[in-house]
Image (spheres, rainbow, N blue to C red):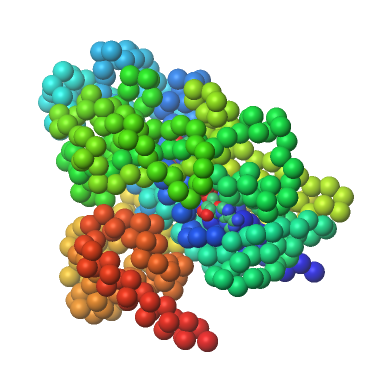
Amino acid sequence: MADYDLAIIGGGLNGVSIARDAAGRGLRVILLEQGDLGTGASSASPRLVHGDLAGLERRHFLRVRAALAERDIWLRIAPHLVRPMRFAIPAHADERPAWQLRSWLLLYDRLASRAHLPGSATVDVTHHPIGNPLKRPFGTAFEYSDCVVDDSRLVVLTAVDAAARGAAIRTGARCTRAERGETWRLVTIDRGHRQVVTARALVNATGAWSATVAETVLRQLPSKPDNARFGVVQMSQIVVRRLFDTDNVYVFQNTDRRLIFASPYERDFTLIGTVGHAFKGDPAIVAMAAGDVAYLCDAANRYFRERIEAVDVVRTVSGANMVMNPASKRPARDAAMSFDHGRRKAPLITIFGGDVTTSRLRAEKAVSRLTPFYPMSARWTAKAPLPGGDFAFGRFENEVDEARARWRFLSEEQARRLVSSYGLNVRAILGEARDRGDLGPAFGPELTGAEVRYLMKHEWARFPDDILWRRSKLGLTMPAAGREALAAFMTTAAAELTCGAH
Ligand SMILES: Cc1cc2nc3c(=O)[nH]c(=O)nc-3n(C[C@H](O)[C@H](O)[C@H](O)COP(=O)(O)OP(=O)(O)OC[C@H]3O[C@@H](n4cnc5c(N)ncnc54)[C@H](O)[C@@H]3O)c2cc1C
């Protein structure tokens, strides 16, 4: 008998979502990730959970409606990670006419369920806070509702839930060989040790690595038409100091008709993106070109009063993934999924790309392809909250207030960060603490030893970057001395956790 029913290579959003879905349906699951969870494209997304307004221009009405339905599901199952925001799109005399924007938004309202979020509105920005950071000529903007998400935490919490339902999650485990017979035999280098596991079915969810993994690990022959249809595309964003005080996401129409988003990012910063183009090279090293930085600065400078230049960029965020039709002007971001099986050939699912919003549904469809092979329980992920998310999204502010009332040493911003990262599980970190000193050493203004230990024990954090850039974004404000102290603390804590485990 095989060790597992399903093995998944790749711990990005696609991989962990499949692991969660399958484990919850009763399958014995193992997920292999060569680095940290979410190191690839999944921590470089535009962080939007949305119907995709631009989809209306392309007349993808059904797709927009389906994505809006998924948006509502995320609000129910991840009310800590997925936050509703008001998006503001200023009318620009040289771009789409105001009547067109207004009619898009009316349609967007109709396609969405009105039960959750308020509908669109027209705003006179000369008398509205939305207008404060904008250049003078803008008189009208349109406001509508959508959501933003912390993408890398979504990956990690999905994996936490998969593990809670029995999945084995192995980070630092590179799959180097997958031999196919009636079952799969996988060779992995797991933190330096060679290991072999067997599984009845395999998922290749390695994103930008998919083609290389297919060729070198699975030893599949590349087919010519596929090579032309798929390609790797890089996507990048910039982070600058906060450019506006409101809680809005600004949507700018660029001269090339792309929509550029400028969103509040970690209290003191603004995230601006995205720009994308074809990518060649190692997906582990995706750097943003100077031309792409200039493109996003120019797009923002068309609208914001405060000018930004390349020197103002405090961080760039880039990732690469496989997409369909890479040569077209607008490579499709749709996910691609293929299913391959046969007599004496264990099933293989290959999945890549797709947006964050529809990742849950995509995983549900992928796992459902295996129903002829295994007895499994019904679809379930639309109703089960992610860890810490068992509260109504409208109660988010109450949860922040309750955290402040219980742990009086928390500032409002600290409580907000903790509740949005951990939801109700914040209790497991702060416990009975009466002041910050009870939480162990401090690293920078926010991070404490108690949180670091929790992340190492329950969320697979191994190195400082796992915490500073994927479990949080505290790397943006962490001083160099705090980083060094964190690295030393994690080395000691890792040894203690290993001893404790034996
Ligand atoms: C051009 C572009 C546009 C996008 N547009 C949007 C958008 O509009 N909206 C949106 O929400 N999102 C968008 N996304 C990003 C989206 O977040 C991702 O595509 C999505 O998260 C799915 O990622 P993934 O799981 O397929 O891949 P990844 O997150 O890259 O995960 C693949 C993982 O496989 C691992 N791996 C590779 N080889 C091995 C091996 N041999 N053994 C073990 N592990 C291995 C890697 O380390 C990596 O962590 C876009 C991405 C791109 C590139």
Q: Position of residue 498 (x, y in %)?
A: 47, 82
| 269 versus 131 height, above or below | below
**For residue 435, above or below residue 375:** below
- Please name the residue shown 25% across and 46% down the image: 314
**Which residue shows up at 65% across the image and 41% down it?**
337
Query: In terms of image quadrants, where is residue 485?
Result: bottom left
Q: Among all residues in the image, which is located at the extreme right? A: 343
Q: Where's the N terminus, which quadrant?
A: bottom right
The mark total stands at: 0
Q: Quadrant of residue 221?
A: top right
- Kindly identify the residue that appears in the image at 34 percent across and 31 percent down: 291
Direction from residue 344 to residue 275 in the image, left or right: left
Q: Is residue 267 visible?
A: yes
Camera-nearest residue between 92 and 101: 92
Expressed as whole percent of the image width and height from the top left, the position of residue 61 reads: 51, 24
Apparent side of residue 459 relative to residue 412 in the rendered image (left or right): right
Residue 140 position, x and y percent, is: 21, 20
**Residue situated in front as seen by the camera: 314 or 138:** 314
Q: Where residue 222 sits: x, y (%)?
A: 71, 39
Residue 93 position (above or below residue 35): above
Residue 24 seen: no
Residue at 48% from the left image edge and 50% from the top image edge: 284
